[in-house]
């Protein structure tokens, strides 16, 4: 009954020439990654996952896309997923804020759990956020480290989409296989890494 949500950069180039001449220009854009304290040119992979790391929904957007609007768009695109999980809790970071945003989630029978922003009173369950937020960061690291998302090699929109989808499918297949073979850690890719 708990999902975690976050976004992670999908870098598509480093030089100004690449940004100007690339087939991705217009979709890919400059953005900032707070967790790495760096600017990048590319896209963002938005993930809504179970605590076990199983992707439930995802979106690939420009680097500057608002995480809140993207999450609402993902939920609107798959209303049957939301309807099948009434009362679901979503754990997010501080960037998922705002009365209108929280009201939109409440209307969908979803409960948002996130740390308080500066100047806000402490929110319920605050002591649980750090270990549970680490879960989504770990899922993102699986994509970047073991599944090599940061070196996807896509040069066109179709190429990037295919490469990102193949990594999402690989993680989903590994979790499914580990579950069916009763492995203790469902998101472990060690058996498939060599």
Image (cartoon, grey):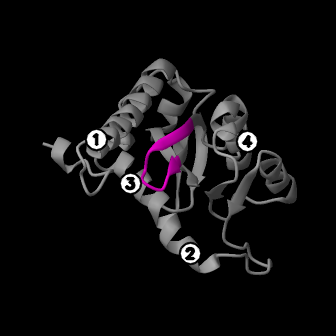
Q: Are marks 2 and 4 in contact (CB under 8 Å)?
A: no
Give the residue drawn at x 40%, y 59%: 138
Q: Distance from label 3 to label 4 (Cα)? A: 24 Å
Q: Is residue 116 above or below residue 169?
A: below
The residue pinned by badge 4 equals 72
**Earlier-in-chain disc, 3 versus 1:** 3
Residue 55 appears in the rendering: yes
**Earlier-in-chain disc, 2 versus 3:** 2
Label 3 vs label 1, nearer the camera: 1
Q: Distance from label 2 to label 3 (Cα)? A: 21 Å
Label 2 vs label 4, nearer the camera: 2
Secondary structure at numbered mark 1:
helix
The residue pinned by badge 1 equals 180
In-front residue for pair 194/125 = 125
The residue pinned by badge 3 equals 141
**Earlier-in-chain disc, 2 versus 4:** 4
Residue 161 coordinates in the image, percent (x, y): 47, 25
Label 2 vs label 3, nearer the camera: 2
Dominant secondary structure of the residues highlighted in magenta in the image: strand
Q: What range of the chain is rendered magenta?
A: 49-58
The question of residue 53 being in magenta is answered with yes
Give the residue drawn at x 73%, y 76%: 123
Q: Quadrant of the N terminus?
A: bottom right
Q: Are marks 3 and 4 in contact (CB under 8 Å)?
A: no
**Earlier-in-chain disc, 4 versus 1:** 4
Residue 34 falls left or right of residue 159:
right
Q: Which mark is residue 128?
A: 2
């Amino acid at each position: 009954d708990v999902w975690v949500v976050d976004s992670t950069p999908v870098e598509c180039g480093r030089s100004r020439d690449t940004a100007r001449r690339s087939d991705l220009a217009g979709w890919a854009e400059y953005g900032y990654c707070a967790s790495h304290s760096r600017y990048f040119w590319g896209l963002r992979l938005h993930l809504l996952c179970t605590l076990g790391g199983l992707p439930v929904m995802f979106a690939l957007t420009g680097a500057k896309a608002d995480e809140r609007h993207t999450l609402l768009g993902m939920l609107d695109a798959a209303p049957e997923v939301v309807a099948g999980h009434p009362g679901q809790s979503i754990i997010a970071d501080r960037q998922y804020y705002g009365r209108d945003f929280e009201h939109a989630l409440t209307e969908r029978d979803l409960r948002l759990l996130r740390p308080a922003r500066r100047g806000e009173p402490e929110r319920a369950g605050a002591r649980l956020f750090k270990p549970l937020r680490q879960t989504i960061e770990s899922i993102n690291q699986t994509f970047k480290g073991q599944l090599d998302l940061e070196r996807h090699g896509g040069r066109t929109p179709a190429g990037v989409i295919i490469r990102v989808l193949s990594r999402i499918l690989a993680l989903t297949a590994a979790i499914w296989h580990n579950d069916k073979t009763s492995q203790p850690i469902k998101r472990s890719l060690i058996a498939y890494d060599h």
